[in-house]
Amino acid sequence: MSNFIFASPRKYIQGRGVLDELGAALRPLGHNAFLIADDVVWQITGERVKNTFQNTELTFYYERFNGEASGNEISRLAEVARRSGTDIVVGLGGGKTLDTAKAVADELKQPVAIVPTVASTDAPCSALSVIYTDDGVFDSYRFYDKNPDLVLVDTEVCAQAPVRLFASGIADGLATWVEARSVHRSHSLSMVGGKPSLAALAISEACEKTLLTWGYSACKAVEKKVVTPAVESVVEANTLLSGLGFENGGLAGAHAIHNGFTAVKGDIHHLTHGEKVAYGTLTHMVLEQRPDEEIARYIRFYRSINMPTTLQELHLANEPFEGLVNIGSLACAEGDTLKNLDAAITAEEVAHALIAVDAFSQTVK
């Protein structure tokens, strides 16, 4: 019989201006930090980050992230970190940067600090990375022995990012309770290899409630680049609640279908992780035969924050049926999580559900 397992970061810090506390927050973890960020993030945060190391007795080395969370990029960065003699890895940026930082820290067996600059994914708190090929095709999940040692989220920085990314984080977060319920119902295991605990289910449910209650007004505030109590709550839901919820509650259809989208080429790959997860969540709900009104509520909410709810918006309106079946085949792959929804679902059934979401969405007022 499987055990209940609950995992979480060692420390989570969130608030306006907390980026200025990064150096002090890293002090218990080591002495020489290896900072990973892409050019855009470093341009925005670099000076502030450097200043946080003053008067801390810590040193740092910055290395540019090349943009893809691939095995080759992880190996390259780990080698640079070894040569520079670091003892803490720090990732600053979005999901792929953070997943790469976790992998580099795992290679070096060193502590890792995660500093998201967008509230766009639930990657920051988890003990796993999504690994892609150098061309951006989903490859595998990489699991770690522990969660990040520090997650530091500056809500003011997150509110300066495009509202599209903030809304994408909400869509990613809304998959949490949908998937956790399926994992619990099907007696499947979570991403940490145990049965979902009461804590995991409660956190997942709180994530959905928070996002549906304040997600719209928070997006409106972020459009103006301001931080309100609603923004603070939604950042916490996008980052901490969704992160703890998906990892300890488990993944199912929504994220497997998101991964399945990498089986087709085209403009769909200009969409964000959360935009694709939104459509994956609706498809999951159709496959699970959720009540029409529940699916319609999600469709209305997604529309209010500009998430795709039709194949046209997903750039798949002209995709032949065979292409949709290919999406289903990849979603049903042995190493993915669609089996946590129902192990008997076929690639063709996924294709039918993708079309059904589109048809239903077009009738929702």
Image (cartoon, rainbow, N blue to C red):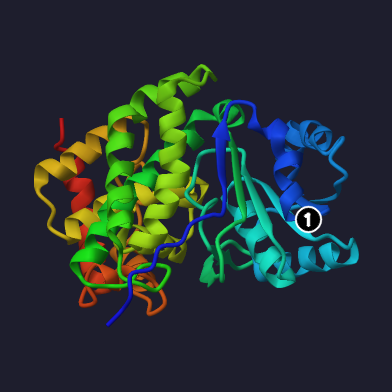
- The quadrant where residue 313 appears: top left
Residue position for label 1: 30
Amino acid type of the residue tagged 1 in the rendering: Gly
Q: Which residue is drawn at 46% across and 29% down?
A: 232
Say left or right for 161 vs 199.
right
Residue 127 vertical position relative to residue 121 in the rendered view, above or below: below
Q: Residue at image x 30%, y 32%?
A: 303
- Residue furthest to the bottom in view is 1
Secondary structure type for disc 1 = loop
Residue 260 against residue 245 in the figure, above or below: below
User: Residue 189 placed where, x, y %?
Assistant: 32, 72
The quadrant holding residue 157 is top right
- Tell which of 46 and 194 is nearer to you: 194
Within 10 Å of disc 1 (Cα), the crowding (few <14, some 14-19, many 20+) is some
Residue 103 appears in the figure = yes
Give the number of callouts: 1
Taking 16 as reference, is 131 above or below it? Answer: below
Horizontal relation, residue 246 to residue 47: left or right: left
Residue 118, quarter of the rendered image: top right
Residue at (23, 62) in percent of width and height:
182
Using the image as rendered, state which of residue 258 and residue 86 is in the foreground.
86
Residue 260 coordinates in the image, percent (x, y): 40, 64
Rendering coords of residue 236 (x, y %): 45, 38
Q: Where, quadrant-wise, is the N terminus in this rendering?
A: bottom left
Tell me residue 267's x, y (percent).
48, 49
Q: Residue lying furthest front in this view?
A: 28
Residue 168 visible, this angle: no
Residues 187 and 111: in front is 111
Left/right of residue 138 with respect to residue 359 in the rendered view:
right
Q: Quadrant of the C terminus?
A: top left
